[in-house]
Image (spheres, helix red, strand yellow):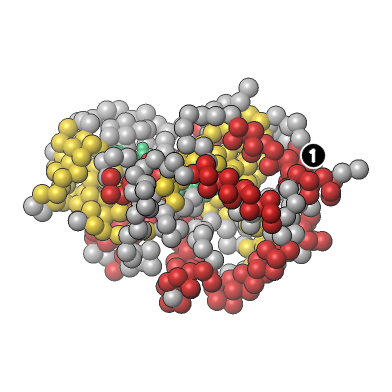
């Protein structure tokens, strides 16, 4: 029987908080109690500000307890693409900030003593084609030379030492990326924010944000609140409370399946180094061992936009066995999804508009970025010199003909899948070439 809840909730469920009447006034009101909102709230409360954080679901019930826990701090465009688009200075600043954000997450977890199974395992990115391998090898060089990140290309004939598959044309191994238990991390962050004095209101929607002299009049489902500052931290769950933002962030479903426990021997064959995994296909997958090393969690994005159809889960299962044919027929115990937020140039953002402060748009890589951006947004309010960020530039542009319903996603994902087919023989056929009798 497939459980439709995150595997992670077996160890840490998004809590149902007691309902409280909001204080009528506070220094900062935060919309959204995921990593972003809590990180901002923690920073502000520790600096002595009165903070109220509202979430229309249970805190953490958005993406922050559903994700893969891969602490990547990814920037979707390559360094070369960023250089072309934003110039060398911003491209370098963004790459340097990703490195700083990854390091800061590790330091934060240690400092706050959050027991969330964080481990700097390294990450392998599998090349879908020989040409992709060449560009990954160049990327390894850039990471080593420009950013002092330990990274190297793994040729196809050495791949098995890192990952038990012949599916890829070699890949890139970098040592600065690790994994954590996302729901345990969330619960630790929530406890820290509450202990610092931030009030968190679960299952209480923010319904309206009205500018007024010196701040905002905020309508919440539990009553009105006046706040000097507002931070919008709604990312892939942005709703009609901010229609302007909604036209700029595309909610895309990211979905994960968990296998039943596998034997120690099989896990050692498939994931000998227990690294986090990514790949270069356009319709790409991300996967990892569970923190206790007993099973594989395998994720990808899909173009489904309504209901909860079965096909994306079946599709994930096929993709898993394309990479690891030995897992054909292995039971799947959990399958779930949540929303990530894409934007037009695929760079996370911190910005202000009409007095509202935003930290959003992590393009599926918020484990590192969301906590970092929330902290930066808080520092901006505090006038702290650490507030400066390469993520702080013009807001992402609006997406033409889009007002929150991503009607174009099925076509986009079909197109990405086609490109993968053209770039190489079908994944299944290729895997069979290598593993068939
Ligand atoms: C399946 C999946 C796998 C992922 N895997 C990874 C991964 O391996 N590595 C990685 O780095 N990232 C991953 N991500 C992305 C990562 O989880 C997110 O980027 C991150 O959690 C974003 O945090 P957040 O606080 O900004 O948003 P969220 O955690 O999504 O929180 C936003 C909150 O805003 C609330 N909200 C919205 N509107 C209102 C309103 N009007 N009033 C009150 N509350 C409101 C929502 O209820 C929601 O809880 C994944 C995401 C998913 C879904």
Position in image of residue 183 (x %, y %): 48, 40
Q: Is residue 198 above or below residue 139?
A: above
Question: In the depicted view, which residue is nearer to us: 202 or 300?
Answer: 300
Query: Residue 376 is drawn in which quadrant?
Result: bottom left
The image quadrant in which ligand 1 is located:
top left
Is residue 224 visible in the rendered image? The answer is yes
Position in image of residue 80 (x %, y %): 54, 72
Is residue 23 visible in the rendered image? The answer is no
Locate residue 216 relative to residue 70 in the image: left or right. Answer: left
Taking the spot 73% from the left edge, 48% from the top edge, the residue there is 426
Taking the spot 44% from the left edge, 41% from the top edge, the residue there is 407
Question: In the depicted view, which residue is nearer to us: 124 or 299?
Answer: 299
Q: Residue furthest top?
A: 1
| Residue at the disc numbered 1 | 326
Taking the spot 33% from the left edge, 65% from the top edge, the residue there is 393
Q: Residue furthest left?
A: 213
The verdict on label 1 being within 8 Å of ligand 1 is: no
Q: Is residue 168 above or below residue 139?
A: above
Question: In the depicted view, which residue is nearer to us: 133 or 196?
Answer: 133
Query: Residue 151 is drawn in which quadrant?
Result: bottom right
């Amino acid at each position: 029987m497939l459980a439709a809840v995150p595997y992670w909730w077996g160890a840490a469920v998004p809590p149902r908080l007691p309902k409280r009447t909001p204080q009528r006034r506070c220094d900062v009101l935060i919309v959204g109690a995921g990593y972003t909102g809590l990180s901002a709230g923690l920073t502000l409360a520790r600096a002595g500000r009165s903070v109220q954080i509202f979430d229309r679901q249970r805190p953490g019930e958005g993406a922050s307890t559903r994700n893969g826990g891969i602490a990547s701090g990814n920037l979707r465009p390559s360094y070369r693409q960023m250089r072309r688009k934003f110039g060398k200075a911003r491209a370098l600043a963004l790459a340097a900030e990703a490195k700083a954000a990854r390091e800061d997450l590790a330091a934060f977890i240690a400092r706050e003593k959050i027991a969330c199974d964080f481990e700097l395992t390294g990450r392998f990115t599998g090349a879908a084609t020989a040409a992709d391998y060449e560009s990954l090898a160049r990327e390894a060089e850039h990471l080593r030379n420009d950013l002092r990140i330990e990274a190297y290309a793994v040729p196809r004939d050495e791949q098995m030492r890192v990952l038990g598959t012949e599916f890829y044309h070699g890949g890139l191994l970098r040592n600065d990326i690790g994994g954590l238990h996302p729901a345990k991390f969330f619960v630790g962050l929530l406890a820290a924010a509450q202990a610092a004095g931030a009030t968190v209101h679960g299952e209480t929607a923010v319904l309206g944000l009205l500018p007024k002299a010196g701040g905002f009049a905020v309508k919440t489902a539990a009553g009105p609140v006046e706040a000097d500052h507002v931070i919008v931290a709604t990312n892939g769950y942005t709703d009609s409370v901010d229609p302007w933002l909604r036209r700029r962030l595309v909610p895309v479903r990211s979905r994960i399946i968990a296998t039943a426990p596998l034997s120690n021997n099989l896990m050692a064959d498939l994931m000998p180094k227990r690294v986090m995994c990514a790949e270069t296909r356009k319709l790409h997958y991300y996967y990892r061992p569970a923190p206790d090393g007993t099973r594989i969690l395998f994720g990808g994005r899909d173009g489904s936009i309504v209901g909860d159809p079965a096909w994306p889960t079946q599709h994930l299962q096929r993709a898993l066995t394309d990479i690891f044919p030995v897992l054909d027929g292995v039971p799947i115990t959990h399958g779930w999804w949540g929303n990530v937020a894409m934007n037009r140039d695929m760079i996370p953002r911190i910005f202000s508009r009409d007095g509202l402060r935003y930290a959003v748009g992590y393009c599926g890589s918020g484990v590192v970025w969301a906590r970092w951006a929330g902290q930066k947004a808080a520092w901006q309010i505090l006038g702290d010199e650490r507030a400066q960020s390469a993520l702080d530039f013009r807001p992402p542009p609006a997406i033409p003909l889009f007002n929150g319903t991503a009607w174009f996603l099925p076509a986009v994902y079909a197109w990405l899948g086609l490109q993968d087919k053209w770039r190489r023989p079908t994944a299944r056929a290729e895997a069979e070439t290598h593993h068939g009798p």
